[in-house]
Amino acid sequence: MKTEFVDVNETRKRMRVEIPSAVVDGEIDRIARDYAKKARVPGFRPGKAPAGVIKQRFKDQILHDVLHDLVPRAVDDALRERGVEAVDTPDVRDINIEAGQALTFTALFDTLPPFEVGDLSTISLRRSKVAVDDDAVAGALQRLRDRAARFEPVEGRGVEHGDTVTVDLTRRDGSDAAAKSEEHPNVSIELGAKANPPGFDGQLLGLDAGGTKAFTIHYPEDYPIGELAKTDVSYTVVVKAIKRRVLPQLDDEFAKDLGEFETLDGLRGQQLTVSEDEVEREVGRYAERAGRTPAAVRAALEKEGDLSRMIEGLRREKSVDFVMSRVTITNE
């Protein structure tokens, strides 16, 4: 891949990208094979249409999918190789794509202006007197534990309060017997979550993995979502898995799990770089919340160009900690 960077001004940049024709054609072939498996082409049995016919018949759709796959990835790779951080999603334009030719496009984006950090030890701050009560300390510790929580499969018992269940859910407007059902497979539901419908959690209590239950929920007149207020909705759930949320203990072992630290105090000396282990842990947290595998979540983040933004977010958190650890703070 060839890239050319032009400084429009101190913060505005223009980047021209050229992706080799071999990469483009390889992506076209891959997507065309996917189309061939599902496309119905007159004169051919399903899945038997020649690649040339598929590429000609679905040319626009295939090229669109190629752009959707290659452009965000190319932009993300180019910025990372140059060590450039865009403050927003780059504006991609002047796209040229054809089979057998290189893919070219231009991306415009803004960056943070350069600045000298200077000697942070010369900064002096005044700390206001703050009374930290036991509830505040407990809340902060709980947030740390929540972020590092893991989910373990449950066996030998039914659903309990606080569990997270994976269900296949069917929903139908209870006031209309002829209404079409809505099917939602692999839905993750945390019992006790505020977003759950009134009385929904109670219907799941005691169900075992593999269990099925049909029930109707009545939404009260004062329900926050107006279109559901004063309505009945019928649900059928099939419980596929039950997991319980396990919080870690706040001790030296917890510090070791977060990274290459021996004690909790060691966490305060961490560097501004974000390690691959830290990225994997953050991706793992995303995956647990989304009910997907870490590999699938990481692939989606890379495809949409969001992985670098996630890494930058982690680095910013460390930067704030770094600065605050070096300034002088005096009490009033």
Image (tube, grey):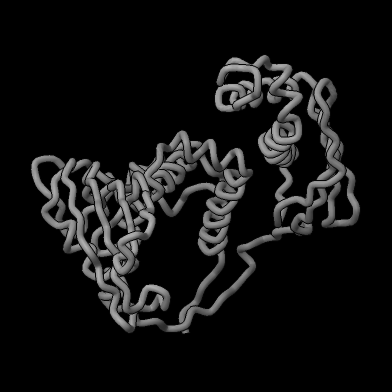
Q: Looking at this view, is 158 or 136 the one in front?
A: 158
Residue at image coords 64%, 67%: 122
Above-or-below relation of 74 to 107? above
Residue found at the far left of this picture:
156
> Could you say where residue 275 lies in the image, as x and y percent from the top left?
51, 39
> Could you say where residue 272 lies in the image, as x and y percent from the top left?
56, 49
> Could you say where residue 250 lies in the image, as x and y percent from the top left?
27, 54
* Location of the N terminus (image quadrant): top right
Above-or-below relation of 203 to 238? below
Residue at image coords 60%, 49%: 309
> Could you say where residue 303 lies in the image, as x and y percent from the top left?
61, 39
Q: Looking at this view, is 293 or 42 the one in front?
A: 42
Q: Looking at this view, is 127 or 3 the one in front?
A: 3
Q: Say which quarter of the image contains residue 80.
A: top right
Q: Looking at this view, is 258 or 35 the one in front?
A: 35
Residue at image coords 56%, 47%: 311
Above-or-below relation of 134 to 322? below
Residue at image coords 60%, 26%: 40
Residue 84 visible (yes or no):
yes
Residue 80 visible (yes or no):
no
